[in-house]
Image (cartoon, rainbow, N blue to C red):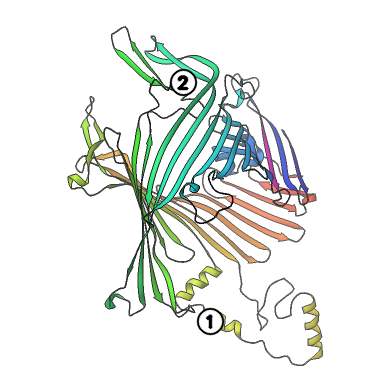
Amino acid sequence: WGLSAQSQYKKRYKFSGSFEANYLVSKSGDKFVPGDYNKTTSFNVRWMHSQDPKANPLQTLSANVNFATGSYFQNSINTTYNVDARTATTRSSAVSYSRKFPGTPFSITGSMDISQNMRDSTVSLTLPNLSISMSTRYPFRRRTRVGPERWYEKLSVGYSGQLRNTILTKEKDLLNSNLVRDWKNGMRHTVPVSLTVPVLDYINLTLGFNYNEWWYTKGIRRAWNEEKKAFLPSDTTYKFHRLYDYSLSAGLSTTLYGMFKPWKPFSLGGNLIMIRHRFTPSISFSYTPDFTKPRYGFWEYLEQTDQSGMLHTLLYSPFSEQVFGAPSQGNAGAINFAFDNNLEAKIKSKSDSTGIKKISLIDQFSWSTSYNMFADSIRWSNITASLALRFSKDFTLRLSGLFDPYLTKYYYGADGKVVPYKSNDLRIANGKGLARLISTGTSFSYTLNKESLTKLLGLFGGGDKDKKKDNNPPPPSSGNNEDAEATEEAQSEGGSLLTRNRQGGVVDENGYFKFDIPWSLSFDYSWNIAMDYNRYNLTKMEYDYRTMQNLSFRGHIQPTPNWTLSFNANYSFDIKKITSLTCNITRDMHCWAISASFIPIGAYKSYSFVISVKSSLLQDLKWQENNRPVANTWY
């Protein structure tokens, strides 16, 4: 049995929302059979709140809460055959508030965030999650500028702070948790400073300095445990701790343009006028010192010799498990390279008033990598590349990939098995090319309907007959006064006799029913290829690839103004069959509505048939029939 309460509220020009609370008690088994009886208590709270943007431009409050205990959606009658509700593994809720302070550069944003894992009943709660930000300031900029801007006036300073209090625990332990002992909390401050100045008129030089500071109220220290032969947490110190780090950066960037006029044999009959290549290279350097040194006091080094004479060492930070972590370890000095390309063309076009049309050949082609000067090996990072090809105004194909510049070798382990590893040998130095693909993929969506189908047919010269037919003028009037009066009466009611009938359908100029059915068919497809780290090819000394594909499609058709049919399905390329399919049929009967849904395949095969009143005031007046173990009932 269960209890449910729902409410909707709205204050005009201010805010609106809805609230729902459900309480459920589920019993199964026999009380008198040991180990068979089970009683579960669960609940679900949903709250939606939105504020009118014009109500208060300085502050906003919004909420999207869907909190439930782990067993609620498994036991609720309303979601027994709801595949999406039962199979969802995670749920999230958030309540956020933001405020701007006029006349100052500061603003604050606060939120409560809840994330649930329905598999193991764990809850991640952050309350509060408060952010303070300051807009970019130019401290050396003159209030009244005379003459050109000076280089030091371009120096900018920003600030952002974050206060976070969070916990990760089980549902049953959340209310019994201790704020000091179980929760993790802290505050982080970030101050970025940057300066951009031109060099030689065409190159931009950017200098940056970034300072971070953390405030914690506790730290966890470790000590040697002889029984478990490991360094384990031994003591928690509750006092104020201040940590910090900083980094330096410098970068150069510019933009180069190249024009190419194609040779006459390759100008597509003179239609291709010019090709332009835009090349944007950039190089930057970043440096972060080693904060594990003893003078900072942020990291500790432990040594212990066990009873067998083996030496154990550990470098750890008492604050690495806190909410914002600890300062980085080891010197980091990287040189970053990035290259961005764009290729466009000008062609002759009769559709353009200027006679020239600009098209994109390669919308974007970019790649980047970095070199770590302080690393003892494998100093080059993986190469990241992306490609965008614009085929039409509405469709752009995007590809992104990751490439490895190093060779992969192997050795035989103690058990005789092959153990692959990434070597320090560059592929280009061993005649294996610049890099090898690690992973790439793409995804796209497309909706096919009457309008898009007409455009496709227009590309191949189709779709002209209907236009010509629609352009034919209607037959002349016979001059009959009765017909004229009937026509005027029909037009006063919102249409003409030639375009309306008693069933609400549409007819053409000859009085025949016009075949105009709204419909749509949508596809969502994704494709990925990546190295399979479980399959190493000894002959090629490389990992083999694995391919992953996913296809989902949905359709909608309205054969008459009152009938609607729709479906939603997913196809698995691994097992080569449709894994889920949901079909829905609805019938509008003015004050009443009929709806039917069924799942013909899968683990949740079911059907449902409902006749209900359309009015929201009588939404509980309905008759429902389904294949669940519940009797048909009038509500």
Q: Quadrant of the C terminus?
A: top right
Which residue is at 44% across, 79% downward? 355
Mark in front: 1 vs 2: 2
Q: Residue at x 57, y 34 (%)?
A: 162
Which residues lie in the magenta part?
41-56
Residue 427 locus on image (x, y percent): 22, 44
Q: Secondary structure at mark 2?
A: loop
Q: Nearer the viewer, residue 489 or 594?
A: 489
Give the residue number, with chain letter if any, for mark 1.
Answer: 465
Element type at marker 1? helix
Q: Is residue 52 magenta?
A: yes
Q: On screen, 485 above or below 45?
A: below
Q: Give the mark, 1 or 2, whose residue is nearer the N terminus.
A: 2
| Looking at the image, residue 161 lies above or below residue 602 | above
Q: Residues within 10 Å of mark 2 (few under 14, many from 20)?
A: many
Q: Quadrant of residue 364?
A: bottom left
Residue 629 appears in the figure:
no
Q: Residue furthest front?
A: 146
Instruction: Return the residue nearer the eye: 524 or 554.
Output: 524
Dominant SS of magenta comes to strand
The residue carrying mark 2 is 318
Magenta-colored stretch includes residue 201: no
In the image, is residue 357 above or below residue 192?
below
Q: Give the residue type at disc 2.
A: Pro
Quick check: can you spot residue 482?
A: yes
Quarter-wise, where is residue 97 in the image? top right
| Callout 1 amino acid | Lys
Task: Give how far across and how far down residue 119 sits, in percent.
Answer: 53, 32
Residue 509 is situated, as x and y percent measured from the top left of the image, at 66, 83
Give the number of callouts.
2
Gap between marks 1 and 2, in whole Å? 77 Å
